Each structure stands twice: as C-alpha cells, then as structure tokens.
Image (tube, grey):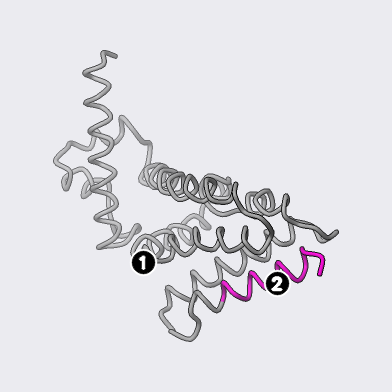
Amino acid sequence: MSTRQQEKSRQTMEELMESAISLFASKGFTATSVAEITRYAGYAKGSFYRHWESKSQLFLQIVEHKMRSYRDERDRRIADARDLEEAMRIIWDFLETMVSDHEWARIFLEFTVHSMRNDDLCAEMRRSQYRLSEDIFAELVRPFVTTDYPAEKIGALNTALFEGFMVHNALETGVLELEDVREAAVALAVSKGMKQ
C-alpha cells in the first residue's frame, strides 16, 4: 500500500471512530448500528469492514486509544512518587479523569455490561489494555508497598472500589462522591501497604 493510500486509510479509520464516539454518546453503544456509523461519517459500510469485523472490535480499539492517552500521563507522574500514598493519589487522579468524561464513562459501562453476554468479548475486556485491571494496579503500587500485604490485593480492592463507583455514578444517585471513594481507597491502601 502506498503512503498516500495508507494516509487515506488512516483518515477513514479516524473519521469512522469519531462518528462512532459521537453516536455512542448520543444513542448508546447498543442502539447504534454500523450503518449509522458509516452514514454519519459519509462512508459506505464496506469502509467499516475493511478496518473492523464488528462494532465491538471498533469499540475495543477506541477504548485502547483512550486508555493509552490516560495511562501515558499517569505513568509519567507515578515515576516521581515518593511513597504509596502519593502513588495512590496519582492513580486516583487518573481514574478521576476517566470519570469526569461523563459520557465516555457511561458508554464504557454500557459496553462492559454488553460484553458480559459474549464469552470471547468478555475475555477480551479482561485484557489489561481495556481497563484498570488488578494486575496493572498491583504493578503500579508494588514498588511502594512496604509491608507483607500483597500488592495484588490492593489492586483488586481499588479496582472493585472504582468499578463499583462507576456503576453507582451511572445510576446518578448522588449519594457518594468520587472524593469519598478516593479517600477510602487511599486510606485502605496506606493502612495495609505502608509500615506505620
């Protein structure tokens, strides 16, 4: 493929992704069809299927791009953390950025629930590039844990707290604020993972 063709292909992909994000935000993942995505972007359906085999595969690529941009900033900052408390606050800054993108958080939650009905898609969603997994969390905090408490448990607890908050937030009950969950998560990690 020539450089010009590669550039056109990349541009088509980006325009289809932007179209999908816009439609997912306004209609939701499930209610948006491939035909609507391509029509909104001004392409034929064949253009879509040259890049992805399904709407779910497109969504996974969008998630991967978004997560990569969030993680680049987090990783740059965490390299300078002095202790577990500071590392946890940096991680929760990263999580807060995701939650503050309210439409994206709702779409991601809808897709996560959608993926639970498909074993292959569910397995794909467990891969680390698509979410804050317990393993990633454990690797981020491990250098700062100064007790025998397993970093994996800190990772699992924080992942559960965050994902639980995402569900709570999507329901718009207004009872919990992210700051409440963040402070509880930091306090729990520090009490278990730092020598007092």
Residue 160 in the figure: left or right of residue 61: right
Predominant SS of the magenta segment: helix
Mark closer to the observer (2, 1): 2
Q: Tell me the magenta residue range.
A: 181-196
Q: Is residue 106 above or below residue 115?
A: below
Disc 2 marks a residue whose amino acid type is Leu
Tell me the element at label 2: helix
- Residue at image mark 1: 102
Q: Residue at x 52, y 45 (%)?
A: 76
Closest to the observer: 86 or 184?
Answer: 86
Left or right of 156, for residue 177: left
Residue 182 among those drawn in magenta: yes
For residue 188, the mark is: 2
On screen, 7 above or below 144?
A: above
Q: Secondary structure at mark 1?
A: helix
Residue 86: image x %, image y %? 62, 61
